[in-house]
Image: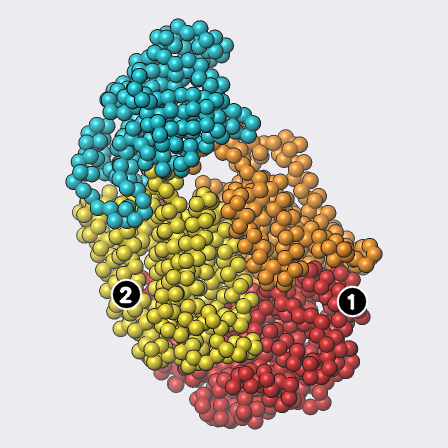
C-alpha cells in the first residue's frame, strides 16, 4: 500500500513539474494546461499582444536545430546570432530597446520548424526569425512566414531558385559559390569532374546547374553519385571514383557523410595531389570533425573564412572565441548568421519600426561591414552581395584563401545571367 | 458493477468530447492548431493500439502508413496550389510534365480514397505474406522497420516525384478555400474531432464484440487459437490493414493542419515515438492511446518551448519513469487509483466521480 | 467391427533423422475412451501432435471417417473437421472471462467476417449455460480465467474442447497435478462425454487408465506395441518386457496392477 | 577481376563493421532478450572515450608516443562502456527482464538522455579523432589498395569474436552465463547467482559496443547522433542471423555486408540500401527465424 502511495506521489510530483515547466513560459501556459488536463483554461494570449507594443524589448525568434542530426551544424549559428544580439544590446539595442531572443528548437524535423515558426510569429509575436539550415527547413518555414507576413533571415548557402518576399537570404546564392568554383577549377585543376552529393534537394539542384555549366564551358562529366543522408560507408563509391580517375571531385555531401568520405578517401590512398576535392558544405567547423590531417590540401568555396583578412573579422573572431572558448572556430554560415542580425537591426533603425513591410522596404540597399567584407542587400531578391573565395584547407584546420573575386558579387538566385542556365530557370517559369 | 463501469467510461468519453468541442473558445488559433495535430496523432494511436494492445503485434513502422496518407493529401493540395501545373521541385529535377502517378491526385475524392487505400494495400500485402509465414514477435517488429527504411529511402531518393527530404509544403487552397486561414483551420479541427470520435466509437464496438475477444485470444495464445479453429493470420492481416488505413486517415488530417509532410515525419524515429504514445497512455484500452498521444506531444511541445536546450532530458526521463513505474500507462494509474478509492471507502464514491470529471 | 472414426496408415514423423513415429498404423473407434500409454519417448504426444496438425507427418495417411485426408490440412482446418485437442499445460486465455473463453471456443463459423458479424443467439447462450453447469463453473462465469484454481482451469479447458462439438477429443495428461477429488470428477466427465464421441487420451497414471479405459494402446519407439483392454495389456509379455526394462516406468505399472 | 576482388573486400569490410556493432547486441538482445535501443549510445560512449584519450595524449604525451593512444583507448572504451552498461542494468534493465518490449521503450528514453548528455559535455558539433599513423595508407597488391584501417577493423572484429567464443565455450564463467540464458530456474537451483550473471553478460555486450565505437572513429563522424545511424543495422544483423545465435550474427553481418556492397556497386547507394532491406524482408519470409534457428518445444 505504502509503495503504491509513493508511486502515486511520484507521478503527481512529475505532473506538477510539468505544469511548472509550462508556467515558465507564460504564453504557453494556458493551453498547456488545456492539452494535458483538458480543462482549466485561462487565456493569456491578449496579454502577450499588448506586451509587444508596450514593453521596452523587441522579441526576435532564434530557430535552429538544437537536437537531432542537424544540431552538429546549427548550434554554432544559433550561438553566433545570440552573440550579435548581445553586442547590439550592449551598444544600446535597436530603436532604443533591447532585443529579447526567444529560442526554439527545430529538432532536425521540418514539420517542427513549421510549428515553431508559427508559434514564434503568432504566439510570441516576434519581429523577425533568424533560423534554419537545410533547404528543407527553409521550405517548411516559407509558407508560415508568408502567411503570417513575418520575416526570416536564413544564413546558409543554398541551391537558389527561390526569392520569397518574407525571407532574407544571407548565405551565398549559387552564383556566389558554385559557379565561380566551377570556373576556377576548370581554369586551374582540370576539366574532368566527378559529382558527389547527398541525396536531397541542394546537391541535386546544384549538380544540375554544374552539369549545364560543364557542358557549356567544355568540361567533362565522369560520374555522378548520390548517397542517402547519414551514409557512412564510401568504399564502393571511392572504388568507382578510382576507376573513373577524374581531375576534380565536386563535393556536395552534407554533414556527417563528409567525415566518412574524407577519412575513407585518405585511407584509400588518394590525396589532394591525386584528385582534388572541392567542397561547398565543408567549413572550419566541419573540418574539426573530419580531422585536418585527412582533408588538408583539398579545396572549399565560401564567402568567408576564419582567416579572412578584414578588421571586422579580427574583432568578430576575438569576440566569438571570448564568448564560446578558445577552441571555437568561425565559419561561413556562422558569419552569415551573425551579420544577418546586424542587417536586420540596421533595417529596423532605418524604418523606425519593426513593422515587417516597413523593414522590408527600408532594407533595400542597406550595407554593412561584415567580417567577410561589405555586404549589401539586393532589393530585388533579398539576397546579399558577397565576395567569393576559394580556399585550401591547411594542416591546422583553418582555410587559406587561394583566390577571391575582387569585389562583392551581385546575387543571382535564378542564374539569369548565364546563358547555359536558361533552360534550368525557364523550366521554373 | 459492470454497468457502472461502463457508465463511468461513457462519462469520461463525453466529458472529453465536450471539452474538445468547446476548446476553440479557450485557445488561440495557434494552440488550437496544435491540439488538432495532437488529435490526428491520437487517431493513429488508436489504430496502433488495436494492433499492439489488442492483437499483440508490435509494428515499429506505422510512420510509413501515416506518411502515405499524408503524402496522398499533400499531393492533392500541391496540385491545387499550382493550379494543375508542375510543382516547382519537379521542374528543378528536370521533369517536363506531370508524372503518371500524380495524375489521380488531382481529384480530391480520389486522393482521399488513395490516402486510405494505399497504406491499407501495402499493409495487407506485407501482412498477408508475413503472418501466413508465421513470422511474429520481434521478427515482425524488425521487419516493419525494414519496410520503413525501404520506403523512406525511396521517398528521399525519388526526389522528382516526392520532393525528396524537403517533402511537400506550401499549400494554398482546398476546394477553393485557403487552407491556412483561421476559419478553415477551425473547420479542420472539428473534422479531426469528428473523425476521432467516429473511429473511437467504431473501434470500441469492434473490441467489445466477439471479434475483440478473438483478438485478445490471439495476443495471449496465437497457437492455441489455431487449435480452437481460428486462423490467426487472417485476423492479424485484417487488423494490420485496418490500423494502416487509420494511420492513413490520421496522416491526411495532419497535413491539412500542419501544412507540410516530409520524410523526417515518417521514418524510424517517429515510428518509435508513435509506439511510445500508446505505451504511455496505456495499451489494451482505447482511451489510453488518445490520452497518451495528446499527453506526450503536449509535453514535448511544452518542454521544448520552455527549455529548448534541455527538453530532451525531460522527454527521455519521462519515458523511463513511466515505463518503469507505470507499466500499464497513464490509464493504468487511474484504474489503480479508482480501485484503491473504492476499497478504502464505499461512501467516497461521490468523490471518485468528481475526480473523473477532472480528467 | 464398425468403421473407425480416425485411421492412421503407415505414418512416419521424422525429426531430422530421429523417427518419433515409425510406420504407425493406428485407428480410433467411435464412442470409446481410448488410452495411449508407453514409456517416455515412445511417441505418444507426437501421435496427438500429428493428428491435430501441430506436427506434420513426413509420410503416410491420416483419414477421418475413412475419406477426409488430414495430413495436408492446417491446424484450424483440422479443428473444423471435428478434432479438438486439449494440451498438457492449461491453455485457457487468462485475460478473458470464463464465459468469454467459452464464447470464442464454441462451435461456430470462425472466419474473419463471420466473427465480425457475430451476434449472440439464444441457442449459443443456452449451450454455454449448459457447459458451465457441466463443469460446475457457473458461479465464476464473469471472473477472469486467469484467477481460477488449477483444477478449474483444466475443466474450463475440457469445456472449451467439448463446446466445439468434435467427433474426436484428444487429451494430453488431463489429470496431471489434480487432487484425488478433481481426478474423479474429471474421470466422470470423460465417461460422460465419450457417449457421443471418441476420446483419445495420453496418460501416465495407470490407476486412472485402468478405471476408465475402453481400449488401451501401448506405444514403444514410435510403433504400436500392443492394443487391447487394460487386462490384456497387463498380461502381455511384450509390454512387460518393455516396461520392466525401464525401472521408473515399471514402478508405475506395478502400482497399477 | 580487380573490381570483383575489391568489391568482395569492401563487402567483407562492411560486414566486419556490422559484426562489430552487432556483436554486443547479439549478446544483450540475442541471449538476454533485452531490446536495448541505447546500444547505439554505448557505441557513442566508446567513440567519445577515444576522443578523450586522444586529447590527453595530444596534451601530455610526447609526440612519438601519440599513436599509442588508439591502442590504449580500445580497452578503456571497453571498460567505460561496460561500466555504463552495468549502471544501466542495475538501475533500469533488471526491472524489465520480463517485459522485453518495455525495455525497448525505456532504453529509447535512456538513449535520448545520453545523446543530450554528450551534447552538453562535448558540444553539439562533431569532434575529430586523428587516426594513428600506423593505420594510414594501405596495403598495395597490384593495382588494389587495401586500407590498413579496414584490415585493422576486420582483425579487431575477428579477435572480439574469438574472445567471445572462447569465453562462452571454454571458461567456467562463460558456461555459467550460457546455463543461465538457457534455463534460468535450473541454473538458480544449481547455485548460480543469476543476478551477477545478468549483470556480467550485459556488461560484456555493452563493452563490445564501446569497442565498436572506438573502431568507428577510424571511419566516420563522431558526434552525439553517431549511435542512431548504426542501431537499426545492428538489429537487422541479429535478426537475420537468428536471435540467440552468435554464429548467426556472423553470417548475418557478412551476408548483409557483401550483398549491400554488390548492390551498391551495381546500382547506386540509395538503390543499394533499398535492395538490401527488400532482400532482408524477403529472406525473413523464407527463413522466419533467421539463418540459425533455435528450436523450442513450448507451444507459444
Circle 2 chain: B
Give the residue drawn at x 27%, y 25%.
C197
* Chain whose colour in the figure is cyan: C
Label 1, on which residue? A271
Above-or-below relation of C71 to A66: above
* Chain whose colour in the figure is red: A
Secondary-structure class at tag 1: loop
Quadrant where the C terminus of chain C lies?
A: top left
- Furthest-front residue in this view: C67
User: Marks 2/1: CA distance?
Assistant: 63 Å
Quadrant where the N terminus of chain C lies?
A: top left
**Chain B rendering hue:** yellow
A129 to the left or right of C52: right
Neighbor class of circle 2 (other Cα within 10 Å; few <14, some 14-19, many 20+) is some
Above-or-below relation of C103 to D81: above
Give the residue drawn at x 24%, y 37%.
C99
Q: Position of residue B82 (x, y in %)?
A: 44, 80
Secondary-structure class at tag 2: helix
Give the residue drawn at x 64%, y 88%.
A418
Contact flag, marks 2 and 1 (Cβ < 8 Å): no
- Residue A15 visible from this viewpoint: no
Q: Which mark is residue B194?
A: 2
* Chain whose colour in the figure is orange: D
Q: Compare residues B57 and B26 and report the one nearer the observer.
A: B57
Give the residue drawn at x 43%, y 51%.
B127
Q: Position of residue D179 (x, y in %)?
A: 56, 31
Q: Residue D255 carries which label?
A: none
Displayed quadrant of residue C142: top left
Q: Where is residue D77 in the image (x, y as percent from the top left)?
A: 66, 50
Amino acid at each position: 500500500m505504502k509503495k503504491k502511495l509513493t508511486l502515486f506521489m511520484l507521478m503527481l510530483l512529475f505532473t506538477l513539474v510539468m505544469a511548472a515547466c509550462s508556467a515558465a513560459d507564460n504564453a504557453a501556459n494556458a493551453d498547456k494546461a488545456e492539452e494535458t488536463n483538458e480543462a482549466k483554461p485561462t487565456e493569456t494570449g491578449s496579454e502577450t499582444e499588448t506586451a509587444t507594443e508596450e514593453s521596452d524589448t523587441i522579441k526576435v525568434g532564434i530557430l535552429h536545430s538544437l537536437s537531432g542530426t542537424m544540431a552538429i551544424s546549427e548550434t554554432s549559428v544559433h550561438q553566433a546570432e545570440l552573440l550579435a544580439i548581445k553586442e547590439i544590446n550592449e551598444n544600446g539595442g535597436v530603436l532604443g530597446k533591447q532585443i529579447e531572443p526567444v529560442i526554439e528548437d527545430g529538432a532536425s524535423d521540418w514539420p517542427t520548424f513549421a510549428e515553431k515558426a508559427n508559434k514564434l510569429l503568432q504566439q510570441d509575436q516576434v519581429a523577425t526569425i533568424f533560423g534554419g539550415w537545410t533547404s528543407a527547413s527553409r521550405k517548411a518555414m516559407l509558407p508560415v512566414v508568408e502567411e503570417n507576413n513575418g520575416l526570416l533571415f536564413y544564413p546558409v548557402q543554398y541551391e537558389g531558385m527561390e526569392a520569397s518576399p518574407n525571407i532574407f537570404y544571407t548565405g551565398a546564392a549559387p552564383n556566389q559559390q558554385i559557379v565561380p568554383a566551377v570556373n576556377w577549377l576548370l581554369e586551374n585543376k582540370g576539366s574532368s569532374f566527378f559529382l558527389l552529393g547527398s541525396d536531397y534537394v541542394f546537391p541535386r539542384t546544384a549538380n544540375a546547374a554544374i552539369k549545364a555549366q560543364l557542358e557549356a564551358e567544355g568540361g567533362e562529366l565522369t560520374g555522378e553519385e548520390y548517397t542517402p543522408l547519414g551514409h557512412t560507408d564510401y568504399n564502393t563509391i571511392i572504388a568507382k571514383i578510382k576507376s573513373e580517375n577524374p581531375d576534380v571531385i565536386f563535393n556536395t555531401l552534407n554533414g556527417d557523410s563528409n567525415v566518412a568520405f574524407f577519412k575513407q578517401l585518405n585511407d584509400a590512398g588518394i590525396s589532394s595531389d591525386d584528385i582534388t576535392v572541392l567542397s561547398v558544405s565543408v567549413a572550419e567547423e566541419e573540418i574539426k570533425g573530419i580531422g585536418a590531417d585527412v582533408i588538408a590540401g583539398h579545396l572549399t568555396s565560401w564567402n568567408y573564412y576564419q582567416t579572412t583578412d578584414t578588421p571586422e573579422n579580427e574583432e568578430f573572431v576575438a569576440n566569438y572565441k571570448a564568448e564560446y572558448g578558445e577552441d571555437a572556430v568561425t565559419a561561413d554560415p556562422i558569419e552569415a548568421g551573425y551579420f544577418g542580425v546586424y542587417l536586420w537591426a540596421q533595417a529596423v533603425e532605418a524604418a523606425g519600426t519593426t513593422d515587417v513591410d516597413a523593414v522590408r522596404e527600408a532594407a533595400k540597399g542597406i550595407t554593412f561591414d561584415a567580417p567577410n567584407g561589405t555586404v549589401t542587400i539586393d532589393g530585388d531578391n533579398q539576397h546579399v552581395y558577397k565576395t567569393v573565395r576559394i580556399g585550401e584547407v591547411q594542416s591546422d584546420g583553418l582555410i587559406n584563401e587561394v583566390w577571391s573575386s575582387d569585389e562583392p558579387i551581385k546575387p543571382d538566385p535564378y542564374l539569369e545571367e548565364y546563358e547555359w542556365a536558361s533552360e534550368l530557370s525557364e523550366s521554373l517559369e | 458493477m459492470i454497468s457502472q463501469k461502463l457508465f463511468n467510461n461513457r462519462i469520461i468519453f463525453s466529458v472529453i468530447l465536450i471539452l474538445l468541442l468547446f476548446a476553440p473558445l479557450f485557445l488561440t488559433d495557434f494552440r488550437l492548431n496544435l491540439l488538432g495535430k495532437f488529435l490526428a496523432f491520437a487517431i493513429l494511436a488508436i489504430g496502433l493500439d488495436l494492433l499492439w494492445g489488442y492483437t499483440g503485434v508490435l509494428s515499429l513502422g506505422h510512420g510509413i502508413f501515416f506518411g502515405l496518407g499524408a503524402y496522398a493529401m499533400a499531393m492533392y493540395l500541391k496540385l491545387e496550389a499550382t493550379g494543375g501545373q508542375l510543382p516547382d521541385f519537379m521542374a528543378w529535377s528536370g521533369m517536363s510534365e506531370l508524372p503518371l502517378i500524380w495524375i489521380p491526385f488531382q481529384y480530391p475524392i480520389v486522393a482521399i480514397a488513395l490516402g486510405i487505400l494505399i497504406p491499407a494495400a501495402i499493409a495487407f500485402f506485407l501482412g498477408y505474406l508475413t503472418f501466413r509465414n508465421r513470422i511474429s514477435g520481434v521478427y515482425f517488429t524488425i521487419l516493419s522497420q525494414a519496410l520503413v527504411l525501404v520506403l523512406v529511402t525511396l521517398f528521399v531518393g525519388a526526389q522528382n516525384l516526392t520532393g525528396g527530404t524537403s517533402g511537400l509544403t506550401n499549400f494554398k487552397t482546398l476546394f477553393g478555400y485557403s487552407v491556412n486561414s483561421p476559419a478553415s483551420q477551425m473547420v479542420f479541427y472539428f473534422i479531426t474531432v469528428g473523425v476521432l470520435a467516429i473511429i473511437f466509437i467504431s473501434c470500441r464496438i469492434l473490441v467489445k464484440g466477439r471479434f475483440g475477444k478473438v483478438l485478445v485470444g490471439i495476443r495471449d495464445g496465437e497457437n492455441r487459437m489455431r487449435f480452437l479453429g481460428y486462423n490467426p493470420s487472417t485476423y492479424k492481416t485484417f487488423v494490420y490493414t485496418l490500423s494502416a488505413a487509420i494511420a492513413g486517415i490520421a496522416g491526411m488530417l495532419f497535413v491539412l493542419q500542419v501544412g507540410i509532410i516530409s520524410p523526417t515525419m515518417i521514418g524510424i524515429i517517429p515510428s518509435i515515438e508513435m509506439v511510445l504514445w500508446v505505451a504511455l497512455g496505456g495499451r489494451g484500452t482505447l482511451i489510453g492511446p488518445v490520452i497518451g498521444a495528446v499527453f506526450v506531444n503536449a509535453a514535448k511541445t511544452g518542454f521544448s518551448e520552455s527549455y529548448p536546450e534541455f527538453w530532451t532530458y525531460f522527454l527521455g526521463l519521462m519515458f523511463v519513469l513511466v515505463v518503469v513505474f507505470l507499466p500499464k500507462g497513464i490509464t493504468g494509474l487511474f484504474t489503480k487509483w479508482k480501485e484503491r478509492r473504492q476499497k478504502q471507502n464505499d461512501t467516497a464514491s461521490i468523490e471518485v466521480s468528481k475526480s473523473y470529471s477532472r480528467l | 467391427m464398425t468403421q473407425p472414426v480416425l485411421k492412421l496408415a503407415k505414418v512416419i514423423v521424422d525429426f531430422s533423422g530421429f523417427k518419433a513415429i515409425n510406420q504407425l498404423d493406428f485407428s480410433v473407434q467411435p464412442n470409446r475412451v481410448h488410452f495411449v500409454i508407453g514409456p517416455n519417448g515412445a511417441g505418444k504426444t507426437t501421435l496427438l501432435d500429428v493428428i491435430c496438425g501441430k506436427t506434420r507427418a513426413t509420410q503416410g495417411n491420416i483419414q477421418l471417417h475413412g475419406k477426409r485426408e488430414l495430413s495436408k490440412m492446417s491446424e484450424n482446418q483440422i479443428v473444423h473437421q471435428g478434432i479438438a485437442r486439449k494440451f498438457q499445460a492449461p491453455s485457457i486465455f487468462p485475460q478473458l472471462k470464463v464465459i468469454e473463453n467459452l464464447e470464442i471456443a464454441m462451435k461456430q463459423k470462425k472466419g474473419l467476417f463471420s466473427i465480425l458479424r457475430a451476434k449472440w443467439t439464444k441457442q449459443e447462450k443456452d449451450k454455454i449455460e449448459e457447459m458451465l453447469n457441466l463443469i460446475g463453473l457457473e458461479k465464476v462465469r464473469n471472473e477472469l480465467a486467469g484467477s481460477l484454481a488449477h483444477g478449474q482451469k483444466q475443466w474450463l479447458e475440457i469445456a472449451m474442447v467439448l463446446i466445439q462439438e468434435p467427433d474426436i477429443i484428444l487429451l494430453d495428461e488431463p489429470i496431471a497435478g489434480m487432487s484425488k477429488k478433481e481426478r474423479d470428477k474429471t474421470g466422470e466427465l470423460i465417461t460422460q462425454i465419450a457417449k457421443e464421441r471418441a476420446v483419445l487420451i495420453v496418460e501416465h497414471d495407470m490407476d486412472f487408465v485402468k478405471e476408465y479405459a475402453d481400449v488401451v494402446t501401448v506405444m514403444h519407439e514410435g510403433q504400436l506395441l500392443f492394443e487391447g483392454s487394460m487386462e490384456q495389456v497387463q498380461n502381455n509379455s511384450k509390454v512387460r518386457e518393455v516396461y520392466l526394462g525401464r525401472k521408473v516406468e515399471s514402478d508405475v505399472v506395478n502400482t497399477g496392477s | 577481376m580487380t573490381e570483383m576482388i575489391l568489391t568482395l573486400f569492401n563487402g567483407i569490410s562492411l560486414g566486419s563493421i556490422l559484426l562489430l556493432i552487432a556483436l554486443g547486441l547479439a549478446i544483450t538482445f540475442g541471449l538476454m532478450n533485452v531490446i536495448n535501443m541505447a546500444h547505439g549510445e554505448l557505441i557513442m560512449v566508446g567513440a567519445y572515450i577515444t576522443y578523450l584519450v586522444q586529447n590527453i595524449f595530444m596534451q601530455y604525451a610526447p609526440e612519438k608516443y601519440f599513436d599509442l593512444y588508439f591502442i590504449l583507448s580500445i580497452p578503456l572504451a571497453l571498460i567505460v562502456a561496460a561500466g555504463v552498461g552495468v549502471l544501466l542494468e542495475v538501475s533500469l534493465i533488471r526491472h524489465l527482464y520480463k517485459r522485453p518490449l518495455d525495455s525497448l521503450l525505456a532504453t529509447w528514453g535512456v538513449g535520448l538522455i545520453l545523446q543530450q548528455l554528450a551534447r552538453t559535455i562535448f558540444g553539439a558539433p562533431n569532434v575529430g579523432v586523428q587516426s594513428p599513423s600506423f593505420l594510414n595508407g594501405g596495403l598495395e597488391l597490384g593495382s588494389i589498395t587495401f586500407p590498413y584501417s579496414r584490415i585493422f577493423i576486420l582483425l579487431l572484429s575477428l579477435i572480439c569474436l574469438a574472445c567471445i567464443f572462447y569465453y562462452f565455450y571454454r571458461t567456467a564463467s562463460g558456461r555459467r552465463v550460457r546455463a543461465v540464458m538457457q534455463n534460468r530456474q535450473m541454473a538458480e537451483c544449481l547455485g548460480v547467482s543469476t543476478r551477477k550473471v545478468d549483470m556480467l553478460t550485459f556488461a560484456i555486450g555493452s563493452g563490445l559496443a564501446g569497442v565498436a565505437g572506438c573502431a568507428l572513429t577510424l571511419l566516420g563522424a563522431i558526434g552525439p547522433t553517431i549511435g542512431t545511424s548504426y542501431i537499426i543495422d545492428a538489429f537487422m544483423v541479429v535478426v537475420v542471423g537468428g536471435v540467440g545465435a552468435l554464429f548467426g550474427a556472423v553470417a548475418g553481418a557478412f551476408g548483409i555486408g557483401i550483398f549491400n556492397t554488390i548492390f551498391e556497386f551495381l546500382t547506386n547507394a540509395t538503390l543499394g540500401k533499398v535492395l538490401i532491406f527488400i532482400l532482408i524482408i524477403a529472406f525473413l519470409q523464407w527463413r522466419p527465424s533467421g539463418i540459425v534457428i533455435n528450436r523450442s518445444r513450448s507451444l507459444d
